[in-house]
Amino acid sequence: MFVHIPKCVMQNKIKFTNLVLSLKSKYTTFLILFFALFVFSANSNAVARQPTSTELEAIQKETMAVFQHFIQLWQEESYFELYKYGKRQSKNQMTIEDFATRMVELDWVPEGFEEGESPEILYHYRTLLYVSAAIVFRHKSNFDLQFAKKQSFLMLKENGKWCFDLMQMIRSPFYSPLK
């Protein structure tokens, strides 16, 4: 007993079978590649190369020079120059005029570093580090009022130069003297 199947039904059945087989092979290949990627990434011990001691020393010298210049500009209240050291995100948040206005409104400016204390560089990556320093702030109008405050400044290297968070600058010297 043979049942006659029309030619168009047979062709559709063959096309459907070919489609199913091609999808199975694509998904099988995808699953095999995904599994291989998962296995290799889980067992990978790939770590970014750490800088040599010479490279670390060069980074520290460069960042220390930038940080000291930054503090000097802040002491001199050269806010338009200081703005140039702002990281991109900070500059997107406020204009140079807004930054200068807000800095002028602050009552405190840095006097220098606390005696016997020097800034410490906390290295994280080639383009990201923290400079921690005990900074002495003085009041702009009452020069006898001073206080020391330990702060850490985030420094990012953007487009080949070290940059600071300008919002941190505006928030940093807040202090209420004891009455």
Image (cartoon, helix red, strand yellow):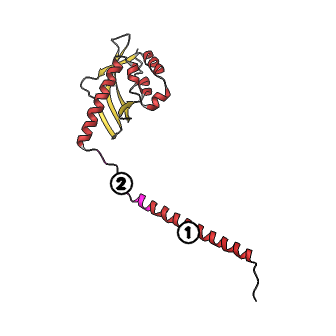
> What's the residue at 59%, 68% (across, down)?
22
Q: Quadrant of residue 160?
A: top left
Residue assigned mark 2: 46
Question: Residue 73 location in percent, x, y?
Answer: 34, 20
Point out the image quarter for the N terminus: bottom right
Residue 9, quarter of the rendered image: bottom right
Q: Is residue 157 above or below residue 106?
A: below
Which span of residues is magenta-colored?
39-51
On the question of residue 130 being in view, the answer is yes
Along the line of sight, the residue nearer the viewer: 11 or 65: 11
Residue that appears at 60% across and 71% down: 21
Asked if residue 4 is positioned above or below residue 154 in the image, the reply reads below
Q: Which residue is mark 1?
A: 25
Which dot, 2 or 1, sits closer to the camera?
1
| Label 1: which secondary element | helix
Nearer-the-camera pick, 122 or 30: 30
> Percent x, y for residue 169?
41, 25
**Amino acid type, label 2:** Ala
Judged by its main secondary structure, the magenta piece is loop
The reply, left or right, for residue 69 in relation to residue 3 is: left
